[in-house]
Image (cartoon, rainbow, N blue to C red):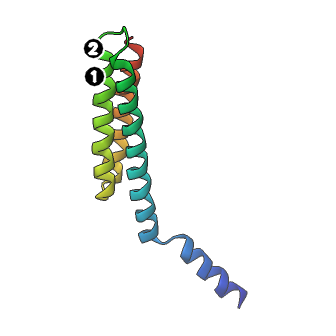
Amino acid sequence: MNNAAAGDAEDDDMDPVDDARRARWTATGTGVLLALAGLAAALMRIGGSSSALVPAAFATGAAICAFAAFLGSRGHTRRALWLLVLGVMVMAFGDQAH
């Protein structure tokens, strides 16, 4: 009887539908969070003494992350992951440009 209960517990942990749902929520939440952070950084840098490239890079990175959040919500989690990486790289480039 214990073996059957252990087998049921393993099946619950490996539910592909639940894994896909968790991946969509993670990609969407991360994309939204990074998009908001990039937008806030762009707004903070607009009034600064740095060049116009810095807020533009943050805004572009935020837009890429927002698009990644949209793709993640549609189930394209691999593409969303790579777009999140790209968006953060664009924002990091903008941060180094000042």
Residue at the disc numbered 2: 52
Q: Secondary structure at mark 2?
A: loop
Q: Is residue 57 above or below residue 50?
A: below
Q: Residue at x 33, y 53 (%)?
A: 72
Give the percent coordinates (x, y) of residue 38. Answer: 38, 32
Q: How many marks?
A: 2
Question: Which percent across, then down, holds residue 96?
Answer: 41, 15
Which amino acid, mark 2? Ala
Q: Residue at x 41, y 18 (%)?
A: 95
Amino acid at dot 1: Ala
- Residue extending farthest to the front is 47
Question: Measuring 31% from the left and 45% from the top, which residue is drawn there?
Answer: 68
User: Which disc is residue 41 wearing?
Assistant: none
Q: Quadrant of the C terminus?
A: top left
Name, please, the residue furthest toward the right: 2
Q: Could you classify mark 1 by the number of other residues whose Cα lies within 10 Å: few (under 14), some (14-19), or many (20 or more)?
A: some
Q: Depth check: 69 or 12 in front?
A: 69
- How far apart marks 2 and 1 lie (CA) works out to 6 Å
Nearer to me, 35 or 44: 44
Q: Nearer the viewer, residue 69 or 7?
A: 69
Question: In which quarter of the view is residue 73 placed?
Answer: bottom left
- Mark 2–mark 1 CB contact (< 8 Å): yes
Residue 2 picture location, percent across and down? 72, 86
> Disc 1 marks which residue?
56
Q: Residue 46's quadrant in the figure?
A: top left
Q: Is residue 2 left or right of residue 20?
A: right
